[in-house]
Amino acid sequence: MASSSFRSSKWDPILIIAQIAALQSLCYVIFSIILFIALTLNGSSVSLDLIFNYKEIRTDTGFGWSLIIVWVVNACLSIPILMVIVQRARQILDYVLTFHLFHLLFVWYVSQHFPSGISWWLLQSVNIVIMTFGGEWACMHREMKPIMISSGNKKSTSSSSQSKQQQQQVKEEEEELIDQQIGSSSSKIKRKSSDAEPKEGQDMTDEGALLAAVGKAKKALMLSAGRSKRNGKQKYDQIPMKDMDSEDNNSTSSNSRL
């Protein structure tokens, strides 16, 4: 499962409430730490009015400007918190507005008056812009990173390597079998071709016998045709066998002499 899949596709109100509470508390903790460092360097005392009293945010005093700088630094440091808790770029604005809405309610409750200072509203709008754009950029940068899929156990890697080796062995065995079959088939073809090649002496004798038999047949047909014409009848189905026997004897004697 990917590391960016923080929330399921279904609507989970308990998870949303937990995220809002975590974001609100962490931002206040970071702001308190930065404010404590700034006040120790300035030599002032720490109080909740510096966080929840809108009248402290002023532009005509140095202490008021120091509080404004602390809020801006807090907005910048809240960007990684948004990336870790929300993890979705399209939901950053909702959580940032929710954080500032609760902060407005807390300020209203502590100061017992609805905040009407222009400097305080300008500071909150600047913080919203910084947290929204910074959180969306961080989440988009994280989502665009390639996801590395790796097995957690060494057993899976070893099993995969063993399976690859087995596959390679099987392929090699199949190739060897194919080569053997090709070699055996080629040897059989060579044997058949060598057996089918006739010898020179046998060719000469077979051709001589065939020529002699053809000549005998022609002569016998000519003799039978001449006799039938003399008798006035054409008979081609009777062949005189005596003449062919005599000619066979003559041909064999001539071949023996050769």
Image: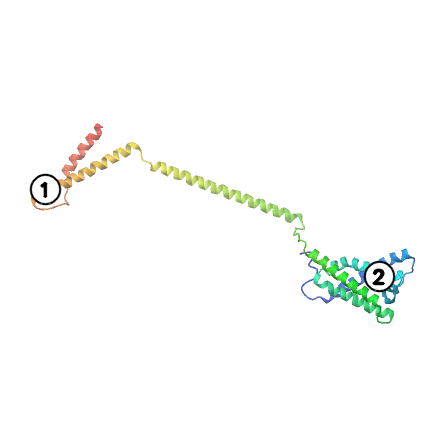
Residue 171 visible from this viewpoint: yes
Residue 226 is left or right of residue 152, and the answer is left
Where on the picture, by quarter, is residue 18? bottom right
Q: In the rendering, at what x and y percent does residue 208 appear?
A: 23, 34
Where on the picture, by quarter, is residue 248? top left
Residue sitting at the far top: 257
Q: In the rendering, at what x and y percent does residue 111 appear?
A: 87, 69
Q: Residue at x 22, y 36 (%)?
A: 211
Using the image as rendered, state which of residue 215 and residue 192 is in the foreground. 215
Where on the picture, by quarter, is residue 255? top left
Using the image as rendered, state which of residue 47 and residue 231 is in the foreground. 47
**Quadrant in which the N terminus appears:** bottom right
Using the image as rendered, state which of residue 170 and residue 39 is in the foreground. 39
Q: In the rendering, at what x and y percent does residue 107 appear?
A: 84, 68
For mark 1, give the secondary structure: helix
Of the image marks 2 and 1, the number of the one nearer the N terminus:
2
Residue tagged 1: 227
Residue tagged 2: 68
The amino acid sitting under disc 2 is Ile
Residue 48 visible from this viewpoint: no
Mark identifier at residue 166 = none
Height in image: 43 above or below 250?
Answer: below
The amino acid sitting under disc 1 is Arg
Residue sitting at the far front: 60
Q: In the rendering, at what x and y percent does residue 217 appear?
A: 18, 40
Q: Residue at x 66, y 47 (%)?
A: 154
Within 10 Å of the Cα at label 1, are there few (<14), some (14-19), or many (20+) other Cα atoms? few
Within 10 Å of the Cα at label 2, are there few (<14), some (14-19), or many (20+) other Cα atoms? many
Height in image: 195 above or below 159?
Answer: above
